[in-house]
Image (tube, grey):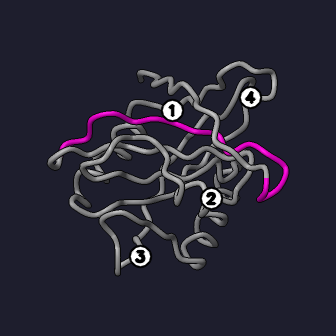
């Protein structure tokens, strides 16, 4: 966050588990999807996760892509729910839940969150959130965020 503190991503246990389950189901390939929510003090509150197909079929084990049609669908669903696209999620099969240089290069939604879940041998392990900060493609960067999972 601009104030130098770590921002926060809040989501229900159900949404958190849905994201992680998607990673397990897609294993050994990467899963991906959109996160819908609203801006709150200190970050985002995610209310829904929308699964997307991974368009990167030539290298689905270590890359992901979401089709423009699915992005339009996510934008429409966000409007229907009265929220915004808060960000995106994907999995890292047998790789840490840390962003890669490719993840940064291919991320363009400044102000949105990117959640990465490590899936080791088919089981979701660690999930981390990163806020894409900056003002241009040249100075964009990921800032780590704490994920607060809300019960109920």
Give the structural element (helix, strand or loop) at label 4. loop
Label 3 crowding class (10 Å Cα cut-off): few <14, some 14-19, many 20+? some
Q: Residue at x 61, y 26 (%)?
A: 8
Q: Earlier in the sequence, mark 2 or mark 4?
A: 4
Q: Single out the mark in the foreground, 1 or 2.
A: 2
Image location of residue 112, percent across then percent down: 67, 47
Label 1 crowding class (10 Å Cα cut-off): few <14, some 14-19, many 20+? many
Q: Which mark is residue 11?
A: 1
Q: Work out whether residue 48 or residue 35 is closer to the camera in this orientation and state it.
A: 35
Please give the residue where the numbered disc 3 appears in the rendered image.
56
Give the structural element (helix, strand or loop) at label 3. loop
Q: Earlier in the sequence, mark 2 or mark 3?
A: 3
Q: Residue furthest right?
A: 135
Q: CA distance from mark 1 to mark 2?
A: 21 Å
Q: Earlier in the sequence, mark 4 or mark 1?
A: 4
Please give the residue where the numbered disc 2 appears in the rendered image.
107
Tag 4–tag 3 contact (CB < 8 Å): no
Q: Earlier in the sequence, mark 4 or mark 3?
A: 4
Q: Which residues are magenta?
A: 123-138
């Amino acid at each position: 966050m601009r104030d130098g503190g770590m921002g926060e991503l809040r989501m229900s246990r159900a949404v958190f588990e849905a994201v992680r389950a998607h990673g397990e189901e897609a294993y050994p390939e990467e899963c991906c999807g959109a996160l819908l929510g609203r801006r709150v003090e200190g970050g985002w509150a995610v209310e829904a996760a929308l699964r997307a197909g991974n368009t990167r079929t030539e290298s689905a084990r270590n890359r992901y892509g979401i089709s423009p049609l699915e992005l339009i669908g996510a934008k429409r669903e966000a409007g229907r729910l009265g929220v915004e696209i808060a960000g995106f999620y994907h999995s890292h099969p047998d790789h840490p839940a840390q962003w890669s240089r490719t993840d940064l290069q291919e991320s363009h939604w400044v102000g949105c969150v990117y959640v990465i879940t490590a899936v080791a041998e088919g089981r979701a392990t660690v999930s981390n959130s990163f806020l894409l900060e900056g003002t241009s493609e040249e100075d964009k960067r990921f800032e780590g965020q704490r994920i607060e999972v809300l019960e109920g």
